[in-house]
Amino acid sequence: MASSGCWKCLLRPSVPVSRPIIANASASFSTTTTLNANPPKKKTGAVKIVKPHQRAGSSLKIKKKAFVKPAGRPPMPGERKALRKRIVLSNTNALEVPMTDLSKDNLLDETLVGKVAGLPDVVVDQLRAVEAFKITQGWGLFRRPAILVREDSVKLARMLEAATEKKEACRVLLDGQRGAGKSMLAVHAMASAFLKGWVVINIPEAQELTTATTDYSPVPNTTPQLYSQDTYVANLLSQIGKANNAVLSTLTLSMEHKDAPIPLQSNISLARLVELGARDPDIAWPLFNIFWREITAAGRPPVMMAMDGLSYFMQYSEYRNPDFDLIHAHDLALVKHLMDHLSGSTKLPNGGAILGVMSRSHAPKSLAADLAITQTEERQLGRPRTKADPFTKYDERSLKVLGNVPVLRLQGLSRAEARGLMEYWASSGVMRTVVDEKTVAEKWTLAGNGIVGEIERGALKMRI
Amino acid sequence: MKVSWLPPSLRGGLRCACSGRPIASLSPLRQPFLSTSAKQFSITSRIRAGIAAPEIDFDELEDKNFVPDLQVAEKKEDTNGSKGKDRDDEVFYARVVPESRSYFGAQPIFIDTLITLRRLVRKYAALPTVKAGEAPRVAFRTLADYRNTSGETVGASKYSQIVEALRRLNHIHPSLRPKEVVDVLNSHKRDINPFDNKTKPIQIDRFGRALGVGKRKSSTARAFLVEGTGEVLVNGKTLVDAFARVHDRESAIWALKATDRLDKYNVWALCSGGGTTGQAEALTLAVGKALIAHEPMLKPALRRAGCVTRDPRRVERKKAGHVKARKMPTWVKR
């Protein structure tokens, strides 16, 4: 027979489990048996119910930590992102370094190679307006924005000069390993374009256009179907207006635009036109087209277009069409516009430049871009061309676009350039070691034969 | 009589001499040679040689009358036996004469060896010797090895006397060494002479390259060092691409950095096996060795910088009953 007590600890139950037959619980004359009565209600509250096998002793009890509400006001929506993206361009603690500023005249000056040149304040504002500065470039360490003039910058400046003279587009693909200074060279090129009075259009991050973070809508009457990104284009127009205000405010509309979504006055300036487009995203794309027609008309200044992180354009975007298929990046209207100019299928009649900057740190791998770059470089050097791998699927449209874009590959800095840069750091008070041959040689070698980003990492960021 | 230390073939004979046990109980192999009472103590010359001095040949002794009875008994036996006269058939005396005077000492073999060696030293003391330090380098057997083979407890200072004599013999001019000296020296040499194992100095080839090889953990690195400007390529990649960690980059070129030669040489290296840290530290050794080929005077500086000595540590193997090399499973009550 099973015992009513706890079989493990052999304790007698303090409360009998089986219901005892109570003889004297009710009056003897009652006809209602106690057995049929409802059991007494359990008392709720502080009454401790002793279980039959409860033992004395302690057991592990883990208290859940109460949620601590953070003190203070939580950040507003977008506040943290703004803080993250904030670009600081000056540091009052840094020492002031005497240096020559970049100007229209010294862009081709070879004596400046290996020296750090300051950016004029006007240009800094313009560059800031087109979002040319990036948070990783360490601008906040120095008194004012300045940039190292290297051999490649003079080379690029010469290419731009030649393009202006010939009234054709200077198409360049900037490539090089991570930290080689590609984006920095693009900043240099944009600064020189601003100095020369060009109109500059910059796409600071290609991924913003293709990763489905901004709205898109089909452009009517297009085959194949194109998609415009109205909010982005409106923002871009506002950037163009702010950065190039000095140039655009002097230019007025030169032709009649019948396809304008809103009635346009015939004598408004291009700055006003851009402002109209920036105000209303719904008409941004048509107005961008009108702006483009105007800016490429005869007698207008050259245009520079720069885009960073080009490999995002060399694949399918993350947008979907009505059939729920992925849209190729080249079917986005703005991207198509850029690609047409990069590939050279659309000309710039007033001259100008299209800079495509590859990214080697945060970018998808584009086999087509890599193959095209390899083949172009081999053609430039007169080497036998690498064949495409027959078993690899390349993005054909990207191959077609990048097939004949000249490549400017950035290598590491030369010793002289590295030394100039380190002397600038030292005189700014950021680098505290003596800059001599030995230090320069050490940092230069450790940075993989002068990769400028790695020199900075070794000299400025990893100080112990 | 205690006979346990004797060779087994001898024990039986001596035992039966001491005790009155019947001979028939012994093994049939020994029976014929124990069958006659006259042969009771005789043993083979081979065994005897191991324990005793050579027997005295009484025939050649002048006083032949000294042992008349035994001689007679032996002669009788000869006429009875089928075989001719043999050394084995000679009479064995239970009281054997020790071969060596040091037989009753604590270390007879050692003493004998030492006497032999010193006798040789004395004998050939007049032979021309080479200058001190110019004798061929020889590693003699270690003390532990000597103790093992001789089975005697010899102290270190005692053994050094042997080594001293051997060294003296080794200094006799090699072209004039007598054969017995050579034999003695050879018998005391170690099986493998560590001094024969000479490191080949790294040569600089006609392109000015020195090839150094280094290892660490399970990585191997080969570094070609040429005079240059401080460019480094590892497996065709720059230092930045080859090693993501700055620490690894520093280890890879540490030999050059520690000696201030970073802008004097170019490195072209191949690494394989293991992980990044192993490869980088293998490169330290490889570059260090190649640098020694270019500038041998840097060796002490490189040794101080840790670019010469190979770190022999490897991953310890996992053991049965352990979770890893040493980790034991968690203790469980039941």
Image (spheres, rainbow, N blue to C red):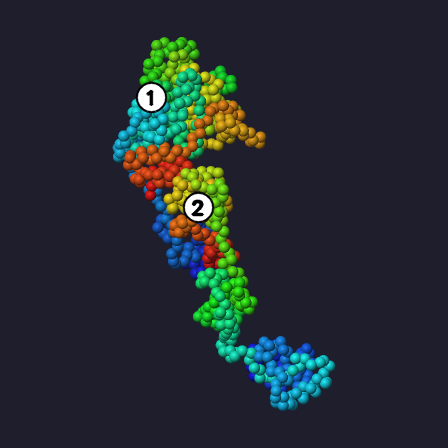
Q: Is residue A222 above or below residue A411?
A: above
For disc 2, the neighbor class at 10 Å (few under 14, some 14 to 19, many from 20) is many
State the CA–CA distance, disc 1 to disc 2.
51 Å
For disc 1, the neighbor class at 10 Å (few under 14, some 14 to 19, many from 20) is some
**What residue is drawn where x is 42% and y is 44%?**
B253
What kind of element bears circle 2? Answer: helix
Image x and y of residue B181, in percent: 53, 68
Q: Chain of mark 1?
A: A
Visible in this render: residue A239?
Answer: no
Q: Is residue A47 above or below residue A83?
A: below
Image x and y of residue B148, in percent: 52, 69
Tell which of A3 and B130 is nearer to you: B130
- Residue B294: assigned label: 2
Q: Nearer the viewer, mark 1 or mark 2?
A: 2
Asked if residue A394 lies left or right of residue B45, the reply is: left
Q: Is residue A136 above or below residue B310?
A: above
Image x and y of residue A218, in percent: 47, 20
Visible in this render: residue A92?
Answer: yes
Tell which of A95 and A116 is nearer to you: A116
Q: Which residue is mark 1?
A: A104
Splitting the image into 4 quarters, where does residue B41 fall? bottom right
What kind of element bears circle 1? Answer: loop
Asked if residue A428 lies left or right of residue B215, the reply is: left
Residue type (three-letter) at the residue carrying disc 1: Lys
Tell which of A189 and A280 is nearer to you: A189
**What residue is drawn where x is 73% and y is 81%?**
B82
Image x and y of residue A227, in percent: 46, 21
Splitting the image into 4 quarters, where does residue B37 fall? bottom right
